[in-house]
Image (spheres, helix red, strand yellow):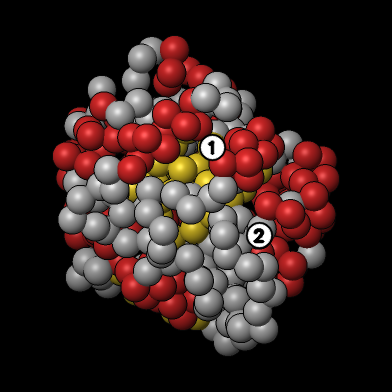
Amino acid sequence: MATALRVSTSTSSSAPSLTQRRRRGAATVAVSSRTPRRPVFRALAAASTVATPTPERHRPLALPPTPTSVADAMSRVRAKGKTAFIPYITAGDPDLATTADALRLLDGLGADVIELGMPFSDPSADGAVIQASAKRALAAGATTNAVMAMLKEVTPELSCPVVIFSYFNPIVRRGTASFATAAKEAGVKGLIIPDLPYDEIRAFRKEAINNSLELILLTTPVTPADRMKEITKASEGFVYLVSVFGVTGARATVNPRVEDLLKEIRQVTDKAVAVGFGISTPEHVSKIAEWGADGVIIGSAMVKQLGEASSSREGLKRLEVYARSLKDALP
């Protein structure tokens, strides 16, 4: 992306030092910061299961096959003549137990890849909806460690790969090698780092390769043709085409330049291309699929369903209805 590399001093995510309490109906689960991560998450998930509206058909009776890679997932979709459905949600909004339920739900609805946003206090590429979502997640205690622990529990249940969308600051704070290793151990298959300039990716690519993480790169409507060619060559999993110049957020219409941008990318690569930013309606995803995109990424409008609901139960219900409407609009 055209943004400059900024390793901000803003707080990304710090673990709470005092005992946290989570209430669901009449059930209260006390979580101590000294409790081991996996049992803590299981306790939270157990409490949330009481309230989740997710139909049983979305909960696999047997563990699905582990997805091999993002590239393989996209190849399978292309081989069927379909367009990949790629929803985005923020980790920890409104809480990590609900995020786990949402991942299972989206997988059950037929998501081909799921993007999971790592909450950060200065999300420069994001609009108001995802900024507010990240703020809520951080306030609820969604640290990097907690997110990874949740993913380690959930990814074995999913049939589609999970890609982490993270700004570079949380990665640097943790240490690039440590972050990449933790992501692999959590079952993550790919990474998107929107504020890491193309010229700087070499420093992180080695860690990604060492941990079998596909580094998905972004190209925008203002990316010069020669740079776009380099980005498409280096991108793994798929090429992320940002549909507009600016931040994330729903738009009334899809940028008509996307059709020509897709054609330009097709001239320099045969890799899968997914379009994101500003996509929010069944008409949008249908149009982008008609223009020849291999995948459609829906972020802010998806995040809204969970984060702005009056309860986790309502949010999951809204997410199911909304996600199904978009999935059904794709060929």
Tell me where residue 298 appears, x and y as whole percent.
34, 48
Tell me where residue 81 appears, x and y as whole percent.
36, 14
| Visible residue check, residue 73 | no
Say what secondary structure mark 2 lies in: loop
What residue appears at the point 58 percent right and 87 percent down from the top-left corner?
A: 18
Which residue has dot 2 on it? 196
Say few, some or many: other residues with alpha carbon within 10 Å of mark 1 (under 14 / 14 to 19 / 20 or more): many
Say what secondary structure mark 1 lies in: strand
Q: Does residue 301 lie above or below 294 as drawn?
A: below
Q: Determine whether, in the image, residue 307 is placed left or right of residue 1.
A: left
Q: Nearer the viewer, residue 254 or 51?
A: 254
| Visible residue check, residue 234 | yes
What residue appears at the point 37 percent right and 35 percent down from the top-left corner?
A: 260
Give the residue type at disc 1.
Val
The quarter of the displayed image where residue 233 is located: top right
Which residue has dot 1 on it? 239
Tell me where residue 90 appears, x and y as whole percent.
43, 60
**Quarter of the figure that contains the N terminus:** bottom right
The mark that comes first in sequence, 2 or 1, is 2
**Quarter of the figure that contains the C terminus:** top left
Tell me where residue 232 appears, x and y as whole percent.
60, 36
